[in-house]
Image (tube, rainbow, N blue to C red):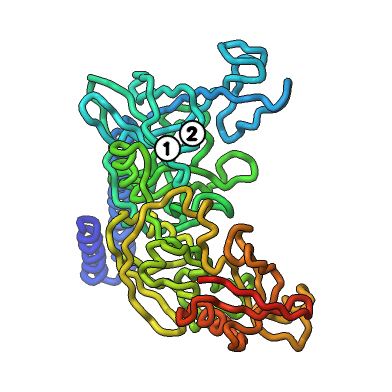
C-alpha cells in the first residue's frame, strides 16, 4: 500500500510540473529534467520495496528452517542379510547399502551372512515422559537388527521399533531421553493445493539436516502398479534423494504435511518427481502403534475395480448405467463380511463412503482402511441404475481376509462383455451371445472349484438369457433361489454348472 501511494504522488507531481511550466523550449528542457528526477526517485522506491520483500521472504525461510530442522532426525540401521551364494550380490538394494565385513562370519555374522548399513530420516512426532517417538517409513527399518537416531544437535540414541506397517509404508520407532527434545507440529494435509510452497527435510546421501524447496506438483497420486494402495501421495518437485525417506515435507508455517517416501527416477537421483505420504494418513497410525503396536484397518469385505477403463472392462459402465461417474465397482463380495451383512452385492458401484466422494477403487480402499472397526458408516451406491444408501458396520481387516477366505468369495469370478476383439481372441463363434469369464482370482473360489474357466461364455442364469452385464448381476444376485444354475458355452460345447449361494 505504501508503494502505491508514493507512486501516485510522484505521478501527480510530474503532471503538475508539465501543466504549470510554460511550453517554451527552455521550459520543456526544465520539465524534462524534473520528470527524469521523478522517474529516478520512483526507481529507487521500487528497488527499496523489492529488497524489503525479498528480505522478508528470506527471513521467513530462516524461521521455517529453525523450526523444522530440530524435529527431523537421521536414522542409521544395521541389517544382517543372508547371501544367496558365496560372492553373490546382496538382494538388499533400495537405498541402503554399503556392506560391512564379508560372508565369512566377520562382525558376528554366520557364514553366508553379511552386515549391511542403511540410512534414512525420521520425524519426532511425540514425547511421553522420557520416551520420544519418531515416525519414519517402514522400508527404512523393516528388516533392521539395530537402529540408532541422530538429532540435529548431534546427540545420538539407540532406538527400538515400536511398530511397522507395510500397507502404508510407515513405522514408529522410539528412544529414551531425559533432556529436552523438540517435537514436530503436524499440519493438515487436506488443506494442501497444487502450487503451494513446500520444503523437504532429511539426510540425502548422508548429508545431515538438508532442506530443499519446491511446490506441490500434484495431489492424490497413486503408487506404481503392485505397490501400496492404502495411501495416496503428494507429488513435489522439492529435491528428494536416497536418505530422505522418512523425512518431513513441510508447509510455509513449518508444519509437517507429508512423509517423504519415494522418487520416480531413471537414474537413482532426484529428477524433480518426489512423493510423500500425506500426514493425515499417518496420524491415526501413530496412536495405533503406541497403544497396540500395529495399525488397525477397517474391512468392508469386497473385491473392487475401476470399470471406467473401457479397455479392461469394455461396455460395463454403460451397461450398468454408471458411465462417466467416479467411484469403485464391486466385483465380488466375501460371504459373511460387513458388506455382505449390510446387503452390498456384486455389481454395485460405490459413489460415496462416510461422506466422501469416491474417486476410484484405490480411494475406496484408503477411505475404508481409515474407518474404525465396530463403527457404522453410510455408503451411497448405484445398483441397476438406481441410487441407494446403506449403513455398514465396518470390521477389522486381517491378513487372512483375502487369502484364507477365497472360498467365501462370491461368485469368485469376473466377467466382461463380449466385443469383437474378445470374440476373436477367445475363439467365440458369432452366434454365441452372453458374457465371458475374464478372470478367476484364485483356484479356491466357488467359481473355480465348481469348474468355471476363463473364456467360458455364460449364456443363461437360472433359465434366463444373459445378454448384458446387467443381466449377469441381476441373475447372480437373485436370492429367491438357493442355487444359481449357469448355462455356459465352452468352445461350442453346452455345459451346465451350479453354484450354491
User: Do tag 1 and tag 2 residues touch (Cβ < 8 Å)?
Assistant: yes
Q: In the rendered image of this protein, does residue 357 appear above or below residue 124?
A: below
Q: Earlier in the sequence, mark 1 or mark 2?
A: 2
The picture places residue 260, in percent across and down from the top left corner, at: 44, 42
Drawn side of residue 27 relative to residue 489, left or right: left
- Element class at badge 1: strand
Say which of 180 and 402 sits in front. 402
Q: Quadrant of residue 373?
A: bottom left
Q: For the point 69% across and 80% down, which residue is it?
A: 419
Q: Which residue is mark 2?
A: 142
Drawn side of residue 337 relative to residue 55, left or right: right
Q: In the rendered image of this protein, does residue 372 appear above or below residue 67?
A: below
- Element class at badge 2: loop
The picture places residue 425, in percent across and down from the top left corner, at: 77, 73
The answer for how far apart the CA atoms under marks 1 and 2 are is 7 Å
Say which of 413 and 352 sits in front. 413
Q: Quadrant of residue 164?
A: top left
Q: Which residue is mark 1?
A: 164
Amino acid at each position: 500500500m505504501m508503494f502505491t501511494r508514493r507512486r501516485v504522488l510522484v505521478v501527480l507531481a510530474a503532471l503538475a510540473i508539465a501543466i504549470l511550466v510554460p511550453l517554451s523550449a527552455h521550459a520543456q528542457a526544465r520539465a524534462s529534467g524534473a520528470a527524469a528526477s521523478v522517474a529516478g526517485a520512483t526507481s529507487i522506491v521500487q528497488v527499496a520495496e523489492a529488497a524489503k520483500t525479498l528480505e522478508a521472504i528470506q527471513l521467513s525461510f530462516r524461521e521455517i528452517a529453525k523450526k523444522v530442522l530440530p524435529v527431523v532426525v537421521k536414522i542409521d540401521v544395521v541389517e544382517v542379510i543372508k547371501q544367496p551364494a558365496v560372492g553373490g550380490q546382496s538382494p538388499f538394494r533400495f537405498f541402503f547399502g554399503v556392506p560391512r565385513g564379508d560372508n565369512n562370519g566377520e562382525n558376528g555374522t554366520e557364514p553366508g551372512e553379511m552386515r549391511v548399513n542403511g540410512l534414512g530420516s525420521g520425524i519426532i512426532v511425540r514425547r511421553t515422559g522420557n520416551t520420544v517417538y519418531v515416525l519414519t517409513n517402514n522400508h527404512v527399518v523393516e528388516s533392521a537388527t539395530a537402529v540408532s537416531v541422530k538429532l540435529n544437535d548431534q546427540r545420538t540414541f539407540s532406538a527400538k521399533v515400536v511398530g511397522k506397517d507395510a500397507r502404508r509404508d510407515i513405522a514408529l520407532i522410539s528412544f529414551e531421553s531425559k533432556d529436552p527434545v523438540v517435537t514436530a507440529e503436524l499440519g493438515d494435509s487436506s488443506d494442501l493445493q497444487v502450487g503451494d510452497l513446500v520444503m523437504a527435510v532429511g539426510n540425502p546421501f548422508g548429508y545431515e539436516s538438508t532442506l530443499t524447496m519446491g511446490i506441490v506438483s500434484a495431489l492424490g497420486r497413486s503408487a506404481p502398479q503392485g505397490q501400496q494402495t492404502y495411501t495416496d501421495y503428494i507429488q513435489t518437485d522439492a529435491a528428494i534423494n536416497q536418505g530422505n525417506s522418512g523425512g518431513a515435507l513441510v508447509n510455509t508455517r513449518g508444519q509437517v504435511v507429508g512423509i517423504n517416501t519415494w522418487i520416480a527416477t531413471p537414474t537413482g537421483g532426484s529428477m524433480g518427481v518426489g512423493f510423500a505420504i500425506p500426514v493425515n494418513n499417518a496420524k491415526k497410525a501413530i496412536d495405533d502403534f503406541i497403544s497396540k503396536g500395529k495399525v488397525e484397518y477397517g474391512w468392508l469385505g469386497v473385491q473392487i475395480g475401476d470399470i471406467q477403463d473401457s479397455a479392461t472392462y469394455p461396455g460395463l459402465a454403460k451397461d450398468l448405467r454408471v458411465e462417466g461417474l467416479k467411484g469403485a465397482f464391486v466385483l465380488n463380495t466375501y460371504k459373511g463380511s460387513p458388506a455382505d451383512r449390510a446387503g452390498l452385492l456384486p455389481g454395485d458401484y460405490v459413489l460415496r463412503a462416510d461422506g466422501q466422494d469416491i474417486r476410484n477403487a484405490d480411494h475406496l480402499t484408503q477411505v475404508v482402511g481409515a474407518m474404525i472397526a465396530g463403527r457404522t458408516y453410510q455408503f451411497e451406491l448405484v445398483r441397476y441404475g438406481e441410487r441407494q444408501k446403506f449403513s455398514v458396520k465396518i470390521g477389522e481387516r486381517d491378513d487372512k481376509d483375502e487369502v484364507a477366505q477365497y472360498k467365501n468369495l462370491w461368485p469368485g469370478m469376473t466377467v466382461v462383455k463380449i466385443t469383437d476383439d474378445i470374440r476373436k481372441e477367445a475363439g467365440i463363434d458369432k452366434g454365441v451371445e452372453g458374457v465371458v469369464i475374464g478372470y478367476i482370482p484364485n483356484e479356491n473360489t466357488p467359481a473355480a472349484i465348481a469348474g468355471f474357466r476363463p473364456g467360458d461364455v455364460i449364456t443363461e442364469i437360472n433359465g434366463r438369457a444373459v445378454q448384458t452385464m446387467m443381466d449377469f448381476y441381476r441373475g447372480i444376485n437373485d436370492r429367491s433361489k438357493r442355487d444359481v444354475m449357469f448355462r455356459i458355452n465352452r468352445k461350442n460345447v453346452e455345459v451346465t454348472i451350479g453354484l450354491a449361494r
